[in-house]
Amino acid sequence: GAVVSQHPSWVICKSGTSVKIECRSLDFQATTMFWYRQFPKQSLMLMATSNEGSKATYEQGVEKDKFLINHASLTLSTLTVTSAHPEDSSFYICSARGLATETQYFGPGTRLLVL
Amino acid sequence: QKEVEQDPGPLSVPEGAIVSLNCTYSNSAFQYFMWYRQYSRKGPELLMYTYSSGNKEDGRFTAQVDKSSKYISLFIRDSQPSDSATYLCAMSGTQGGSEKLVFGKGTKLTVNP
């Protein structure tokens, strides 16, 4: 139980394009989803927290107009990196937590490379 | 002082060794403690979850929480090369909702055959 998937697993795009990453909870309803990014050899950095049906809460320093988060259902959240630039290249990981769970379950991550 | 301190290692042990991984924290409000394992280029995988103080055992893994010392540990018995990964401690103060997890930086472990 408590499986979270992400799609795509990796993506390469040109500078200036937008990229959408999907995060799905497969066997539970995720009332809260979290988006992280991770640079090589560093720990997870929380970008934003989203609750189903409401606007995401962004961490300080994270541009909400650049990283658009939608949590339209209890099993799906999306992160859209708008007008991506090479410095946005990173490993993006989502996690999900349901009402019945006390902890976060992570997706496998999406590796983004912006050329 | 950071909320959660974790020695990044790297830690290298021979196969079969007992591994001890630790984190200290400063926020006395933390009640929920987790250990995640992260293989290279993969998302973190939940290993152990404990609430408040005490021990919890699951197979070769034992998690300990000492709230009086603000210290948590993960022990791995009979370590295997497949245990080679980065281990992240994480903790939070309340259950559910939008409570954020606070992570340690992770300890990189290598188990040599």
Image (cartoon, rainbow, N blue to C red):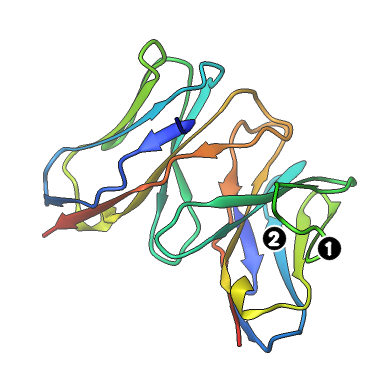
What is the x, y in percent for residue A78? Answer: 77, 62
Query: Seen in the image, is B87 located left or right of residue B97?
Result: left
Please state which of residues B93 and A7 is positioned toward the viewer in this rendering.
Answer: B93
Chain letter behind tag 1: A
- Residue A78 visible in this rendered orientation of the protein: yes
Query: Seen in the image, is B97 located left or right of residue B78?
Result: right
The quadrant of the picture occupied by the C terminus of chain B is bottom left
Helix, strand or loop at mark 2: strand
Residue A73, label in figure: none
Helix, strand or loop at mark 1: loop
Mark 1 → mark 2, Cα distance in angstroms: 19 Å
What is the x, y in percent for residue A73? Answer: 85, 52
Task: Check chain identity for marks 1 and 2: say if they share one.
Answer: yes
Chain letter behind tag 2: A
Residue A65, label in figure: 1
In the image, is residue A44 above or below residue A20? above
Which kind of residue does numbered mark 2 sit on? Cys
Residue placed at 61% from the left, 88% from the top?
A: A115
Please state which of residues B94 and A68 is positioned toward the viewer in this rendering.
Answer: A68
What is the x, y in percent for residue A92? Answer: 60, 63
Residue placed at 72% from the left, 66% from the top?
A: A22
- Residue B56 visible in this rendered orientation of the protein: no
Total marks placed: 2
| Precedes in sequence: disc 1 or disc 2 | 2
Residue placed at 65% from the left, 25% from the top?
A: B95
Q: Residues within 10 Å of mark 2 (few under 14, many from 20)?
A: many
Q: Quadrant of residue A17?
A: bottom right
Residue A23, label in figure: 2
In the image, is residue B110 above or below residue A100? below
Please state which of residues B35 and A30 is positioned toward the viewer in this rendering.
Answer: B35
